[in-house]
Image (tube, helix red, strand yellow):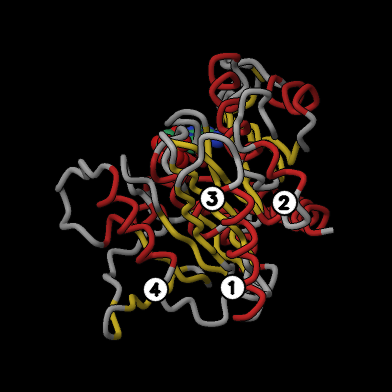
Amino acid sequence: MAEPDDPLSSLDALPDAQRIRSRKLVGDIASLVVDATGLDEQARNALERDLRSAALELPGVAQARIALTASQPGRKLIAIGSGKGGVGKSTLAANLAIALARSGKKVGLIDADIYGPSQPKLLGSDDKPTAEGDRLIPVAAHGLHFLSLGQLVSAGHALAWRGPMATGALARLVEADWGDAEYLLVDLPPGTGDVQLSLIQRSRPDGAVIVSTPQDLSLIDATRAIDLFRKTKVPVLGIIENMAGYVCPHCGETSDPFGSGGAESAARELGVAFLGRLPLSAGLRSASDAGTPPAAGDGPEAQAFARLAVKLLEALDTAAD
Ligand code: ADP
């Protein structure tokens, strides 16, 4: 979305404007990230040349850096984000990926949460990926394949990665040998930092799902995450509300420790789809801790994740139209 004082906003009038994924001017250097999906060599060169000369004509621009990216044909990359940590983003990413795989899709899952890579634990697999040359080969678990930043460092080592180290490691995971995977889900770190931006710029997700708990504070952060995806033109597929409502396992009474419905009304206000909600559930937590993801079982939670997976695919279809 053009901001009134954005000196590069006039690039929006160009015929190729819809391919521009991000743009910024630092000093007199304009940097553009451009989606060249589907273009042959000649068309890529023409696109780069046209954008460069258009940028150089703008006042205050002395240099133009154009980065062309292209998504893997036919493979959908879906980012799972949240405004803050602890809202259940990783748990949902794992179980949604399993639900998609159970519906017959070929699914890969990337754990890019540098602050707490938890997919090996959630999926109950300590296997390390092998490599062919420099290319990692993902690990199989619960009918999908996955890679985690946690597999690249030895257990117990804090991942105090920032900037280039983290983004370089993430690029290795995305560019791994995903074979015939149709969907690649990426469990992002919470917030809107380097890792999120680098994924958006280099890999151009086909859509993003935002996980939030119902309370206001979590939703304010979720709104920031939505803003980032919107500004970089990644379709926001919808919000999932997690930990909404609690059914007491002893007396059966339902209570709302974090409130309920907050994410649904926020989604409405923000003009984003609401994909569904999951209750706060002691069973979900203990199964997750034990590495036996509920989506792989046959209880009501498996059905809830299957419904969410259907919604996700519908939202992805709508976004692609
Ligand atoms: P995030 O990735 O957002 O940091 P996690 O997926 O790691 O969050 O979840 C944080 C904690 O909350 C974990 O212990 C997880 O088992 C628990 N949790 C997640 N969703 C639920 C839920 N619906 N009910 C109960 N516990 C949950």
Residue that numbered label 3 is attached to: 32
Disc 3/disc 1 C-alpha distance (Å): 15 Å
| Amino acid type for the residue under numbered disc 2 | Ala
Q: Name the element at disc 3.
A: strand
Q: Name the element at disc 2.
A: helix
Q: Is residue 300 above or below residue 215?
A: below
Q: Residue at x 62, y 33 (%)?
A: 226
Mark 2 or mark 1: name the one nearer the start of the chain. 2
**Mark in front: 4 vs 1:** 1
Residue that numbered label 4 is attached to: 138
Q: Which labelled disc corresponds to residue 17?
A: 2
Task: Using the image as rendered, state which of residue 52 and residue 119 is in the foreground.
Answer: 52
Question: Position of 23 compared to 105: left or right?
Answer: left
Mark 3 or mark 4: name the one nearer the start of the chain. 3
Instruction: Give percent across and percent down for residue 281.
Output: 55, 34
Instruction: Give percent across and percent down for residue 167.
Output: 34, 52
| Amino acid type for the residue under numbered disc 4 | Pro
Residue that numbered label 1 is attached to: 45
Question: Position of 82 compared to 120: left or right?
Answer: right
Q: Residue at x 61, y 29 (%)?
A: 6
Q: Name the element at disc 1.
A: helix
Q: Is residue 165 above or below residue 229?
A: below
| Amino acid type for the residue under numbered disc 3 | Leu
Mark 3 or mark 2: name the one nearer the start of the chain. 2
